[in-house]
Image (spheres, coloured by chain):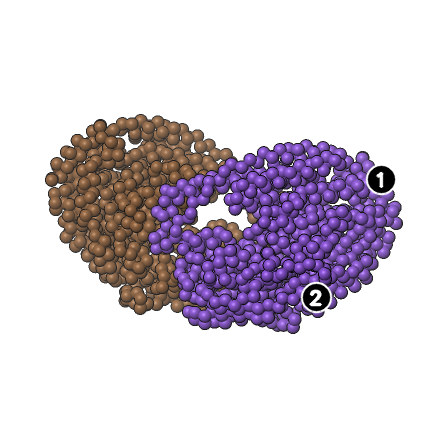
Chain colours: A purple, B brown
Amino acid sequence: MTNHYIRLLALALCWPGITQAQERLPGGNQQRQLEQRFDKQLSSTHIGETIQSLSSQPHHIGSARGKAVAEDILQRFKSYGWDAEIVTYQVLFPTPKERVLELKSPTTNKALLKEPALKEDATSGQAGQLPTYNAWSADGDVEGPLVFVNYGLPDDYEYLERAGISVKGKIVIAKYGRSWRGSKPKVAQEHGAIGCIIYSDPKDDGYYAGDVYPKGAFKNEYGVQRGSVMDIVIYPGDPLTPNIGATVNAQRLDRLQAPNLLKIPVLPISYHDAAPLLKSLEGPVAPEEWRGALPFTYHIGNGKATVHLKLQFDWQIRPCHNVIAKLKGSELPDQWVIRGNHHDAWVNGAADPISGLAALLEEAKAIGALHREGYTPRRTLVYCAWDGEEPGLLGSTEWVEDHAAELQEKAVLYLNTDNNGRGFFNASGSHALETLVNDVARDITDPQTNVSILTRKQASDALKAPTAKLKKERLAKKNLAIGAMGSGSDYSSFLQHLGIPSLDYGFGGEDAGGEYHSIYDSYDDYHRFKDPGFQYGVTLSEAAGHTVLRVADAVNLPFDFRRLYETVNGYVNELAELAAGMRESTAIENQLIQEQKYQLVTDTARHLLQPSPKAEVPYLDFSTLQNALVALDTTTQTLSSRKNHTGAAYDKALYQAEQQLLYGNGLPARSWYKHTLYAPGFYTGYGVKTIPGVREAIEQRRWTEAQEQIAVVAAAINRLTVHLNGL
Amino acid sequence: MTNHYIRLLALALCWPGITQAQERLPGGNQQRQLEQRFDKQLSSTHIGETIQSLSSQPHHIGSARGKAVAEDILQRFKSYGWDAEIVTYQVLFPTPKERVLELKSPTTNKALLKEPALKEDATSGQAGQLPTYNAWSADGDVEGPLVFVNYGLPDDYEYLERAGISVKGKIVIAKYGRSWRGSKPKVAQEHGAIGCIIYSDPKDDGYYAGDVYPKGAFKNEYGVQRGSVMDIVIYPGDPLTPNIGATVNAQRLDRLQAPNLLKIPVLPISYHDAAPLLKSLEGPVAPEEWRGALPFTYHIGNGKATVHLKLQFDWQIRPCHNVIAKLKGSELPDQWVIRGNHHDAWVNGAADPISGLAALLEEAKAIGALHREGYTPRRTLVYCAWDGEEPGLLGSTEWVEDHAAELQEKAVLYLNTDNNGRGFFNASGSHALETLVNDVARDITDPQTNVSILTRKQASDALKAPTAKLKKERLAKKNLAIGAMGSGSDYSSFLQHLGIPSLDYGFGGEDAGGEYHSIYDSYDDYHRFKDPGFQYGVTLSEAAGHTVLRVADAVNLPFDFRRLYETVNGYVNELAELAAGMRESTAIENQLIQEQKYQLVTDTARHLLQPSPKAEVPYLDFSTLQNALVALDTTTQTLSSRKNHTGAAYDKALYQAEQQLLYGNGLPARSWYKHTLYAPGFYTGYGVKTIPGVREAIEQRRWTEAQEQIAVVAAAINRLTVHLNGL
């Protein structure tokens, strides 16, 4: 059966008279048959072999093995029948030359800064491992008093201020968790710290959380989370080439002028290395929420414990090898459905990123097999394996910046994955694609429970709801709400810089552990604790593959702007409630301060200053935003009652609708981020802020800016409405 | 100025024309002058000396030193000019003969069961200390598999059931905290356990909470909390003589038939001794809420770790020496204002109970001095120092049972204190006395902040409120709500058995530590961490002394039944909400179970069974209770608009009003507790349950009983209304 025959049949089945579910499914029953043939090509055994093979050696960006992995992937794509090439950029990537961390007083201790090999983990003793470090730490040789700052969040510094403790000229030690690691040195630097140490407390992913590796999955005392501390909320990618591709001849910034690089040194350490430092601290006992699971009392510090931190890096420009594979569409070759996952790892990276990459390659293998049998998608498929994601989404960002105009013309969808595990289906992305995600998830079976991955996820959402009322509401919901995208993987440049409709998929929730970015993220760890049997690898291939194929083959592109409208309407309600809540709490806090209640209640032995009063929260005018939503409501209602408008131009108008939500000037103080609905939080890093211009202005009490941003977002929504009215 | 002169002046000042505050203050300005003279007699230095002297040696019930302390107190009262005597009862009190706790497999370890002497604590190495044990443990010699049961609450056993783990025939290890210690072996026994170990986790009052003794106030690795595990929620006092005084010739139960004694052995241990036991456990990882601060992963157990527990006690009848001191009233000698605090301690007991006792003795000294200067209270004062409180309120309960009829005739008020510390004023008791407590607290200055103890407590209540809305509400409140009484000190028999209006006072919140019931509850600990300078000792004397004197001298006894009405009305609303909330959550949980959501969501690697469905919650008829409250509303409104009805008979009707709230048959399954509004919780122990007959029937899903108890409480409230109408 040829592709053309299938296509014609599919078109025939799309006309009125068939059921709504079939109608919604691009290609109807024929597409389902294609999916069944696709699924038959997927092999959990092969996914396991891919994971073992590609994670068999350390393969970070710039390493010989990293290049070999890219070439291996290239060959795989080619062997599956895809047109594939390696597209290389030249990016800055620092590696450590010298790392010293010493406790100098009241006692002395030198940190190990080394994860030991384990006999239970075959790859843990290999050569070529990157040492434990944070990429984009500044070079530095500093010595000073140590201060414990909890998770290093802005709120933690508010507490320190009340405790009368400044970090100015000092070295802070912060726990991993709660915020993106890069936020910790950034906030420390904002407060005048001269160095930053980040450690993994056993309460968060060590023995408190569960048995430690190799007995269990959690962090043993030597495990260290490597990771980037580039300020990706300003912009990701090569820090020297914002907005443009890091080609050989690209114009580059002076590194010391790059606005997303730190000025202070920062180093991640294990709890083995953190314990003597924390134990040496005196001064106030840390508040209860600050305390971890090390077996002593946590103190904040009183200046007597001092540390020496010396870090020097090799700041080289290195090649960044993206692998780009294409399968040209039969009917609409200039409409691209893009699928990506990175291939670089901090060390072996069996989970991060190889588990997701193995699923992607399995899809490419299956589609290649279908292609050999005669199937060609209507639209072009672009499968990507990105390099340099770990240091800051380097490979994907440079490629996207380099192909910005073409992508804004051609890209229908970008579907991302990254590390994958066992458990529940997590999907986030553009809300106009929420209906598509629901339809896909409804048809895929969870390997552990034999219900659909949609049903299982909905059950989890219902059970997790904190109150009976919310449980009831969630049980009654027929559709799964997808999350909004922050950052932390390769979708950022597609969605937030270019406005390409994007999704991110993964499974998890039953695969917790402490291997993240350590040498123990290995095949030995993965097959014991993450996805034994690699069944969720297959399930991820199914979810991503079906999504790609449905979009690629769709006669009516499955955008549903009603879901977008309803989601944004919810966000606007949240913003109004946020401002109202802050108004109420600011008023009452100011009254408590004015009436000296804090002074009356504060334990006189603890010497906590009362908080400073804050300016009262003005009423904001949300009306432009609300009126914009009324118009979008009407338009999307009309649109959803129309059917079957097809053709390349109509398609293009549909997938370019998301671009109407971009604002050319970008977000305040970070113009690279142009999407008015989604961005990583300025202080949360990976964590999303929806309608970020307004939300962050409110949260950070910049009222004039909040009002301005309401207008910016309202204008963007109005552009979308006008655009949709033109359909 | 003679007492009579003051009295006449006071009467004169009470007539209309004076301000309301003066009006409410029994005796008006003259009483305030008396209070000022009283306050001048109080000495923080003397309170410190009393604490040091009376806590200088271990002095538990039945010990030679315990008797000597009673005699010392007797001499003090006499020297202050009071008529005092020692009133002795003969009570059962077990002390250990043999204590063995051994880990038998997978490794072996013998528990120390010993708190070491510290050079920083002068009394910690003395002879005569009671060993670490739980009084009223059964004799036993058991060996079996060990199971970790978190805090040993009924909910914890629900989780164990889901995990498929039975404690039948096994020995459980539970953490101290969350419930009264006696509930832990009781619930374990109900589930078939053969032994129970209770330990203090460092997360609760050890190094996680703060620096450990002697550096700081919290529990070092060897500290052990002794304590009673008598089932005082059935009845307190000598277990052999419920309802009657334990006089020499009293008829006694056979110990093995006493319904409030355990059948299984139970032993408290330190975290030093607990660590090897907990570390030896395998099987499922304990749920997050179960985990403590020891530096390893907490497991529940899989049967492989076994322990041997052997305990033998000396079950002797011992003398229990209460000291009763009286100062006869000038006008109404048969109306008694009773004040009490226990004198026995587990070991030295500087905080518990001597800090409260020292304040009581300071009051007696001051009143004695005023008496020498010519003052005599209108009503009789009865100051009591109870023996045997620690094992189960023995001394107070036996005295109260022995004098039940006389007390129900004469007792206007029982005001209790126990251990005292630094911080905020805590008051609980009969809500008809709430206005009195507010008036007293408004006039007493907090030694740290120089505002009234009322203002400071209200500031704390406002700051602690979890939401802006609640903060606002609490800020707006003019009056302090007093707590309801559960159990855990000597007020139980007065209030809950006889219906004597009762109060309990104390200061705390800034004096946390881990010394409770250990050898480290010493003078050295107390003056460093509890109430340095003994200023709160003076403040407690003021609060209690002013209350006693105002009631003793009152022309109009300061009962305010409006506050009682409003409080009970609040409780009834809570009960209706409790039932409605359970109805909603039961329905939704049953739906989740029926739709197999738990099975879909449960991690297949964790093998948790889904919960069992529960019977749906029927609608209860609260109308009898609501109608009773309408009548009480009207009556108390009328009553509060009347003034100045005086005379002995009127007084008596006022203070006997609380007795109308008793129900002769008592609470279901625990007839000793007769008050329909206040009781210790059947499973919380010390923690109060208000309107306990109804509340516990609802909580424990006994719907017929809940409906019956609504009628019982409604009838009690109607009795009160009729009684008040008769005034």
Q: Secondary structure at mark 1?
A: helix
Tell me the kind of residue under disc 1. Ala
Expressed as whole percent of the image width and height from the top left, the position of residue A512 reads 60, 58
Asked if residue B630 lies left or right of residue B605, the reply is left
Q: Quadrant of the C terminus of chain B?
A: top left
The label number, if any, that marks residue A12 in the structure image: 1
Q: How many marks?
A: 2
Q: Tell which circle, 1 or 2, labels the residue nearer the N-terminal end.
A: 1
Expressed as whole percent of the image width and height from the top left, the position of residue A516 reads 61, 61
For label 2, count other residues whose C-alpha is less than 10 Å away and answer few (under 14), some (14-19) or many (20+).
many
Tell me the kind of residue under disc 2. Gly
Q: Chain of mark 1?
A: A
- Closer mark to the observer between disc 1 and disc 2: 2
Residue at position x 33%, y 48% in the image: B424
For label 1, count other residues whose C-alpha is less than 10 Å away and answer few (under 14), some (14-19) or many (20+).
few
Residue at position x 21%, y 52% in the image: B43
Residue at position x 54%, y 57% in the image: A186
The correct choice, above or below, for B550 with respect to B142 in the image is above
The label number, if any, that marks residue A66 in the structure image: 2
The label number, if any, that marks residue B257 in the structure image: none
Asked if residue B618 lies left or right of residue B545, the reply is right
Cα distance between the residues tagged 1 and 2: 48 Å
